[in-house]
Amino acid sequence: MMGKRIPALARAIEARFPGTTVWVKPYRSPDGDPEKKWYLRILNCPARLTPHAQIFGIRLALRLWGLGRVPLFIGAVNRRHTREYFGHVLASPRRPWSSYGRSRPSSARNARRRLTPRAKRR
């Protein structure tokens, strides 16, 4: 589960660097590291601000979680690379970080089923 700190971190980055979009996705370490569970990418960064956005995100994450406890990687991507490699993310109407870490029904139909008494189901 993502918790409240990752969405707060994403909102802070987007507020500090207008025009950027934060995308958070689950991360599975090839080494089996249980500490890092998420990868946060800052998309659409102006080229000259890309390193500053990444450093800002890392420093803020260290303040939120403490030294050595940050459960995510943070990377910033400039506009050209965003278009080339992450265009599908920006085409989505939902906030990229909003779909992870919260319990939600897999579809509206499943939500209705849970609310409907068992006898009426068919």
Image (cartoon, rainbow, N blue to C red):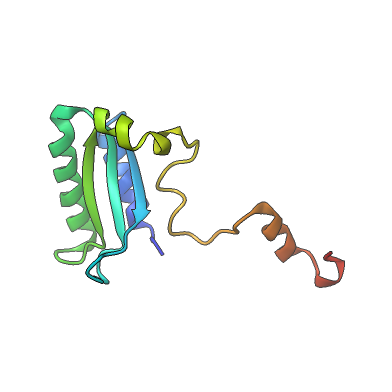
Viewport quadrant of the C terminus: bottom right
Where's residue 43, x and y in %?
29, 37
Q: Residue furthest right?
A: 120
Give the quadrant of the N terminus: bottom left
User: Relative to the observer, which residue lies in front, 81 or 18?
Assistant: 81
Say whether residue 101 is visible. Answer: yes
Residue at the image point whose x is 40% and y is 39% from the top: 89
Percent across and percent down for residue 94 are 49, 40
Asked whether residue 20 appears in the rendered view, the answer is no
Compared with residue 77, is residue 70 higher up or lower down, i.e. above or below? Answer: below
The answer to which image quadrant residue 70 occupies is bottom left
Residue 33, image quadrant: bottom left
Q: Position of residue 44 (x, y in %)?
A: 28, 31
Residue 2 percent across, percent down from the top left: 38, 60
The residue at the point 15 percent across, 66 percent down is: 68
The answer to whether 96 appears left or right of 22 in the picture is right
Residue ID at (38%, 33%): 87
Q: How many tags in the picture?
A: 0
In which quadrant of the rendered view does residue 79 lie? top left
